[in-house]
Image: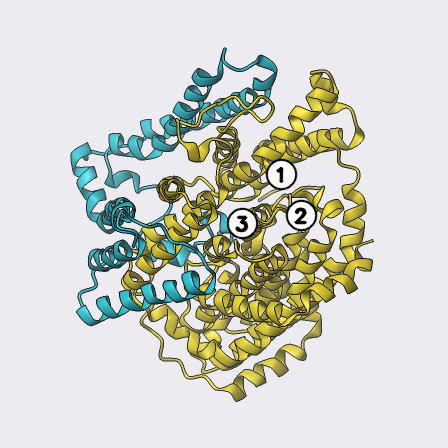
Chain colours: A yellow, B cyan
Amino acid sequence: MALELVPEALGVLLTLENMAFIAVGVMFGMIAGSIPGFTGTNTVAIALPFTLPMSPEIALVFLSAIYVGASYGGAIPAVLINTPGTAGATATVLDAYPMSQKGEASKALGISILASCIAGIISAFIILLLLGPIGDFSFLFTNREIFVLGLFGLAAVAVAIGDNMIKGLVSGFAGLLIAAMPVDPTTGQRRLDFDFFGLYDEVPFVPVVVGLFAISELFYLINKRAISEDTKVNTSYGDILEGFRYAISKPVDLIRSMLIGLGIGSMPGAGTSVANFVSWGIAKNFSKKPEEFGKGNPEGVIASEGSNSAVTAGSLVPTLALGIPGSGTTAVMLAALLLHGVRPGPELMQEFALEANIVILSLFFANIALLVFAFSVSKYLVRIVSMPANIIVPAILALTVIGSFAMRGLMFDIWLMFIFGIIGFVMRKNNYSLIPMILGVILGPIIEGAFLRSMLVSSQDPMYFFGSTLAISLWIGIVLVLFGKPVYNILKGSIRSRTNFFD
Amino acid sequence: MTANQSESDGGRVESTQSASGAGGPEDEHAYSRGYLALVRLSFPTAILILAILYVENTFGNIRTENLYYPYFVIGLLIFFLGVVYTREIRRLLQVESDEKLTTSLRVAYDKWQRSIGLVIIGVVYIFLIEVIGFFPSTFVSMIAIMLVGGLRDPKLIIGGTSIVVALIYVMFVQGMGLAPPEGMFGI
């Protein structure tokens, strides 16, 4: 089904305007991604309100390009100054920086660029092929299944992201409660808006997203002078090309890391940091020189960068198909979909299959743009990290203020953004993951709508939510997600106390 | 670097955390039990109060069938909050610290004074927007944040601020047609 839409999607995508936005998005993402601590999630969150005047297609293309650029951008400081720009580049540091210390910084950059681009392009192609089956599967979801799926998504993300499952669940259900504060969707009666007109009919998710991610980050960044002052690295275009040649000579490593990234990225909430370490570990096991891993083995750079680039495409699968984000950045992408009238969830592949195709196809072109820009300017972007944080912070604050105001033209939204920035800071300080809360706020109205319609259809019978095989499977999935790990730990402890099986 | 470092904190990586001295729970020995309770229980307590206010505002005012969903959410939320409270209080009871609350607050202030400064300037900034408009208040607030952030070079302060304000105007007001908030004087 979905492949039939490819020519039409290409027709929409291949305009000068879209190509320009892809170029700008990739460049912007690369710059932001190269700032350690300022990642794809924050970058897409900041850019989100500025897509408001754009058409939905251009906005989604632009944000996807930012996502691709930021995913790669994290590798630049990882290679050059031993500091990953994003969580997804953490394993890159292990071999890329030792390569730099051995005078092979350019080669490491070249490997990271080509591994990212090739893995990104191939994984986008695979996802494009999968869109059809995903679309067919989505037809199985009615309101009942959408409600249970929403709960499943929250549980899965709460468990997968962060160290503390219960805190993740608190975060997610707090998001659902916040989303339920405006008027009752059926009667229009006010619930808990504190007499603020801005909260009357909806919780504006853009200020919430920008506040939680971008503003809370500023409270950390302000305490730093410069991210790094060690920018004296010699690089050359010739050696970057040498890195290209090395990456091409390792197709098996590339494909393996890409498949790992794609698989892990497709799991709700798993994210890039898991993928790049798993990929790095597996590459080490398969390597003929495993003892060189962590000491500047180029295969380690391919493993990490190939996988984190494939995660970008992979994490869009649960996002587009089910409305469950595969990573923090795709959680913000969900907000972007909603902002432009594309309703996330299983219905997306029924009603917005063209938009889904456009998003995936834009990854192809974004990766090609990445290849050009990354080759041209990577060696210079290291200077970004030497920029004083006390200049970056006020600039970002000003941008987020105008961005939050832009959506509805209400000062209330600026206040809300700032308050959620403080809430985000407190949450991060106490190890509460932000992503479940965002997911709760974004999916809340969809879950509540599905619940109310299901209750209406079933004459208020709660057993209706257990009335289909798919719904029961999802309930079982929730139980497994919530209790699988604790039960495993109990069993492991019990077995360990009696045997030496785990020792 | 830790393998389980995820994008859960908005993608912030560990190097940034350590560099900024931020992230994760406080060092238990450096702070008083009262301070740790204040920090750790602030978020769950705020959510609990929100849930109570929700019930108070809706119970009896909205027909019961329409409250099934929000009360289902609140029920589960209170259960999870109960688990969090139990765990946190148990951890707090194990804390052995001779520090006083006031001392801990002072230590925390020293550590986070720039962040606190940013909060104060942020609040004043948003108030100012409504009075003098977006661009003048942005100009003033950016300078204030740079000063709080430790920047003292006047050329960098004025130059950086002017460039950012000009870029915002050109890109977002002229280029994208966004209308920034105006103050009482229509600026």
User: Mark 2 or mark 1, which is nearer the start of the sequence?
Assistant: 1
Q: Number of labelled discs?
A: 3
Residue at position x 68%, y 65% in the image: A13
Rendered location of residue B49, percent (x, y): 39, 23
Q: Are marks 3 and 1 on the same chain?
A: yes
Residue at position x 67%, y 42% in the image: A345
- Tag 1–tag 2 contact (CB < 8 Å): yes
* Nearer to the camera, A119 or A421: A421
* Disc assigned to residue A153: 1
Task: Please name the residue that numbered disc 2 is placed on.
Answer: A318
* Nearer to the camera, A367 or B120: B120
Residue at position x 34%, y 56% in the image: A398
Q: Tell me if residue A298 can be seen.
A: no
Dot 2 amino acid type: Pro
What whole-number distance in Å separates the C-alpha atoms at marks 1 and 2?
9 Å
What whole-number distance in Å separates the C-alpha atoms at marks 3 and 2?
14 Å
Identify the element where label 2 is drawn. Answer: helix
